[in-house]
Image: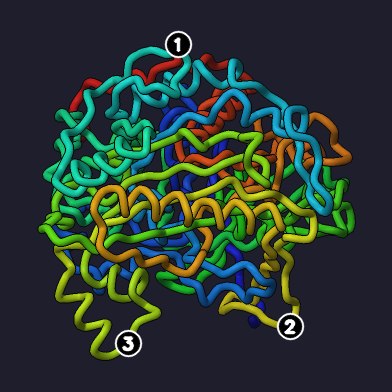
């Protein structure tokens, strides 16, 4: 890339890179605490969901983070990068599953020990540490659910009542019951009652194509209107952050440099605190590209742990073809019912940790190109004609982190800004393979018990990237501390799934948000501000 003039922006107190779940919540909380914030996002801002999102699966492919950004090696089959491109990030294309992690999930090394070739670590915080933030987030984003058999006895009620069951969930519930398994409405960040700037779910089924009504939580509709109304937030969409700059001695992060997609210009945003809230591939990529004489191995990487310990949820998507009409286009895509009976280590299993089953439907294009991708010609057409009779289980397990599963950068492959592209190496651990085998077996058993005449096992894949800037108490073995503050640069923070030392067996977004709330609290304290455990203007109308 030829040299360009870099335009200096007016300084702010906090600069946040990425306006997804973590970055969007951080931006609002810090602005309401009285801080000035620049929120920089690589994708566009869809400010008017009713006009910008359409019920068209192919047209809404534009919301997904582009796979062309990376190269991949290893034996773990790749699914999509579970992230969106735009203000809202992954919440543009997520399914709303909003589970708390289990108490045991924070102490996997202590409880289950280390596996050969793995890099399992305990979290530097406990469930008790995070519980108040879980409660705050659930109330703030409007989680709908009912206390289930796996919830702690002392947990508060969910803020919104659960949704009713649509036909596919009623049928699948019978399968769980016939096998003696517990099935319960899954917690979802999908409004079952009206919320400010958000309508209750209309059950149209277009969940991962951008929610037109705002029922599905996203910072784009639930945070940004309030954040911008403070007058203290500058939102910079379509801006690609290229580097984090530091002082000469490398001890202070001073600014971020970014490219503006709209006019091709380069800009520099000075800030007193910088938060990197990208997805777990882009976070190490940015910090590697921010290397300097003081940080020759990448910014905040004196431990050589940056980019390592990449993990995902191994996914055993399993589908049943039934004789009756399941109306799979009604409701929302995922988690009308869940079963967490296998979510933790069980002594009879030849693996540690566990998996969860969540009811799943698909719209036609998704079914044709994913669940039925292995079929072709007449058989594919015959199955698609039975679309209304197909529903399944989204069964995901806890992936095991390994130091060799890692993100690096390719100096010989650069993007349009001259920034090295990322390379991901990802292998299944043997524990992942054994877990997947059992997950497929159990999912198929539930579907047969529910009356499925045919079982279709989608090729195993992975979802929910985590772990490339793990938190920990020891600077020699981790990138950040328990509030996301990097060990090497005290005014540089990381937010998002990259922080996770282990990944649990349940969906990660509620934990990402709870950690972001803790990080916002810590940053606010740096400036002598207090962050309440409830965002103040929740009940007022967005401007």
**Whether label 2 touches label 1, CB < 8 Å:** no
**Residue 395 visible (yes or no):** yes
Q: Nearer the viewer, residue 44 or 475?
A: 475
State which tag comes first along the sequence, 3 or 2.
Answer: 3
Q: Nearer the viewer, mark 1 or mark 3?
A: 3
Residue at figure coordinates x 18%, y 68% from the top left: 387
Q: Is residue 409 above or below residue 250?
A: below
Q: Find residue 391 and report its image quarter.
A: bottom left
Q: Is residue 475 above or below residue 17?
A: above
Which x, y percent locates residue 400? Answer: 68, 49
Toward the bottom, the furthest residue is 377
Which residue corresponds to mark 1? 153
Answer left or right for 200 relative to 463.
left
State which tag comes first along the sequence, 1 or 3.
Answer: 1
Which residue corresponds to mark 3? 376
Q: Nearer the viewer, residue 116 or 155?
A: 116
Which residue corresponds to mark 2? 412
Give the spatial CA distance, label 3 vs label 2: 38 Å
Q: Is residue 411 above or below residue 201?
A: below
**Residue 222 visible (yes or no):** no
Q: What element does badge 1 sit on?
A: loop
């Amino acid at each position: 890339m030829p040299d360009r003039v870099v335009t200096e922006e007016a300084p702010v107190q906090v600069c946040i890179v990425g306006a997804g779940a973590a970055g969007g919540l951080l931006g609002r909380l810090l602005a309401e605490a009285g801080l000035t914030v620049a929120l920089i996002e690589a994708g566009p801002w869809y400010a008017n969901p009713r006009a910008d999102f359409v019920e068209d699966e192919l047209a809404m492919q534009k919301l997904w983070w582009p796979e062309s950004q990376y190269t991949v090696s290893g034996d773990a089959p790749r699914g999509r990068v579970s992230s969106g491109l735009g203000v809202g990030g992954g919440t543009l294309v997520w399914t709303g599953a909003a589970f708390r992690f289990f108490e045991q999930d924070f102490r996997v090394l202590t409880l289950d020990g280390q596996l050969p070739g793995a890099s399992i670590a305990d979290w530097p915080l406990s469930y008790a540490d995070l519980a108040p933030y879980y409660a705050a987030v659930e109330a703030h984003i409007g989680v709908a659910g009912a206390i289930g058999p796996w919830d702690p006895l002392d947990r508060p009620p969910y803020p919104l009542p659960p949704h009713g069951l649509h036909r596919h969930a009623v049928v699948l519930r019978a399968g769980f019951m016939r096998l003696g398994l517990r099935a319960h409405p899954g917690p979802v960040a999908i409004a079952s009652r009206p919320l400010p700037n958000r309508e209750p779910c209309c059950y149209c089924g277009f969940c991962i194509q951008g929610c037109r009504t705002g029922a599905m939580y996203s910072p784009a509709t639930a945070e940004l209107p309030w954040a911008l109304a403070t007058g203290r937030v500058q939102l910079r969409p379509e801006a690609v952050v290229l580097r984090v700059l530091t002082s000469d001695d490398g001890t202070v992060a001073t600014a971020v440099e970014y490219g503006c997609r709209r006019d091709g210009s380069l800009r520099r945003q000075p800030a007193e605190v910088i938060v990197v809230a990208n997805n777990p591939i882009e976070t190490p990529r940015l910090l590697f590209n921010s290397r300097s004489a003081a940080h020759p191995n990448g910014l905040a990487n004196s431990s050589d742990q940056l980019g390592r310990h990449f993990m995902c949820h191994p996914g055993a998507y399993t589908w049943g073809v039934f004789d009756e009409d399941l109306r799979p286009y009604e409701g929302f895509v995922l988690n009308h019912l869940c079963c967490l009976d296998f979510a933790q280590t069980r002594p009879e299993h030849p693996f540690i940790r566990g998996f969860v089953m969540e009811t799943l439907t698909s719209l036609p294009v998704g079914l044709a190109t994913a669940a039925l991708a292995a079929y072709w010609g007449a058989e594919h057409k015959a199955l698609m004609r039975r679309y209304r009779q197909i529903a399944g289980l989204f069964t995901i397990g806890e992936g095991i982190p390994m130091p060799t599963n890692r993100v690096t950068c390719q100096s010989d492959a650069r993007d349009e800004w001259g920034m090295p592209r990322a390379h991901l190496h990802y292998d299944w651990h043997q524990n992942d393979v054994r877990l997947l085998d059992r997950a497929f077996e159990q999912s198929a058993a539930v579907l047969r018990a529910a009356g499925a005449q045919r079982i279709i096992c989608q090729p195993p894949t992975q979802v929910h990237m985590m772990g490339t800037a793990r938190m920990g108490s020891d600077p020699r073995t981790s990138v950040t501390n328990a509030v996301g503050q990097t060990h090497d640069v005290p005014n540089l923070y990381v937010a998002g799934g990259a922080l996770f030392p282990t990944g649990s067996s349940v969906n990660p977004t509620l934990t990402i948000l709870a950690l972001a709330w803790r990080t916002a609290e810590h940053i606010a304290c740096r400036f002598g501000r207090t962050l309440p455990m409830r965002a103040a203007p929740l009940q007022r109308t967005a401007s």
